[in-house]
Amino acid sequence: MRRKRVALISEHASPLALPGGVDSGGQNVYVGQLARRLPQLGYHVDVFTRRDCPEPPEIVAWADHARIIHVPAGPAAPVRKEEMLPLMGEFTEFLARHCGRHGSYDLIHANFFMSALVAADFKRATGVPFVVTFHALGRVRRQHQGGQDGFPEERLAIEDRVVREADGIIAECPQDHDDLVNLYGADGSRLATIPCGFDPAEFWPMGRTRARAILGLDPSERIILQLGRMVPRKGVDNVIRGLARLGRDHGIAARLLVVGGGSEWPDPAITPEIGRLAAIAAEEGVRDAVTFVGSRGRCVLCSYYSAADVFVTTPWYEPFGITPVEAAACGTPVVGAAVGGIKTTVVDGETGYLVPPRDPDALADRLARLFRDPDLLRRFGRQALRRAAAGFTWEKVAGEMAGVYAKVLTERPARRARVLPRAVMIPSVPDGLPGLLVGEEFESR
């Protein structure tokens, strides 16, 4: 049978990017893992992502029947995702030209609202159905960031349009599902809740002693790990303040490892958030107990998760959050903010603890409970590992995603291929963004 052809669009988050930067995190992992797993289920996958440097070729092999295609939209240089919307016209034009040369796709899976704009415009012109995973919602972001939200106002209108026009919508957790229904009026019949996952070949409990030896860490020190993107909403400042209260109010000393940033060396000039966090650590009197590690490749993250006594993540909000699942897969208990997907991945009092965001006193209290009871710490770690293995593997995620694709393709049966006119006007979005002219012929299935 012919492999179904799926285009994964991820305009700012390439699977090739090093995690931990300002715009590099869970979405990069999500897209990369789906691109690796879906071919095992009979799909051919192309990942379309914006070219952000001049070096990589247009097409890069990623896995069997999976490729990454670098789209020349805007400069071949980094662009903040908050400033990327005007480049989506070029992105859509490139997608159409690519289909003119190589044939179109059976289905598009858009990731983030800008990729979804591309998919929606492409569907209007060609009839190719699309599925969307938003990864974050504009209205939720506005609730938590207010005036600090740097995305243009058009984002909300685009998301409204996408929710109306998408053939399938993926929520990453129950909170995401509720937000899509209550804030966007999403049709429940087109919604599917599919979590993120972990790869057992990447993350496993290698043992604390071995992991610390690999990383050169003190085998006797209490170690708390924070790992992820270095942006204010991730709440790393709250973790630093919690560390200070752990020592001051509970008499327990520990070391905090902060992994992430825009470079392998923790340079505040490259990652300004590191400078802000270092100042907070100094203000709280724990600068010597906080180690900023910098960004690290995924090949060594298992060692960091396994070396830690406890993993902490306390963002203001979190659509899903892959890092708590990865920590659990390494047998490390998690103390996380009771927000978004973390409320699903962490079972309070069983695999770790849930605490309010921006509450360092509550965080310090839960950390003190764990450090005072080593048996509880080990039990939570074992239970976290079992839960991650049972419900949160990328193999399981890809299987559920393939089920959504099959449903969409069944409900929209393949039509006889037709050749579109040489010039195709791709419709504009409701708020008046310009239409896009496609200048080559291509087939629409």
Image: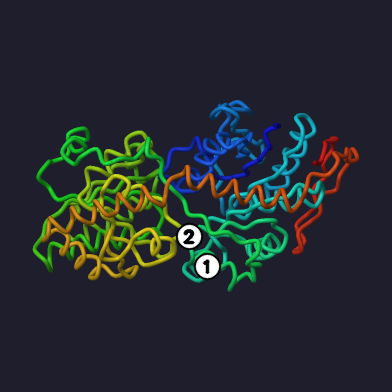
- Measure the alpha-carbon separation of dots 2 and 1: 9 Å
Residue 109's x, y, as percent? 64, 47
Q: In the rendered image, which quarter contains the N terminus?
A: top right
Q: In the rendered image, which quarter contains the C terminus?
A: top right
- Residue named by callout 2: 319
Q: Residue furthest right?
A: 421
Residue 267's x, y, as percent? 34, 42
Query: Would you place residue 429 above or below residue 211 in this image?
Result: below
> Please, what secondary structure does the residue beneath circle 1 have?
helix
Residue 131 vs residue 284, the one in the foreground: 131
> Please, what secondary structure does the residue beneath circle 2 have?
loop
Label 1 near label 2: C-beta < 8 Å? yes
Residue 6's x, y, as percent? 66, 40
- Residue named by callout 1: 140
Q: Nearer the viewer, mark 2 or mark 1?
A: 2
User: Residue 350 vs residue 103: left or right?
Assistant: left
The amino acid pointed to by label 2 is: Pro
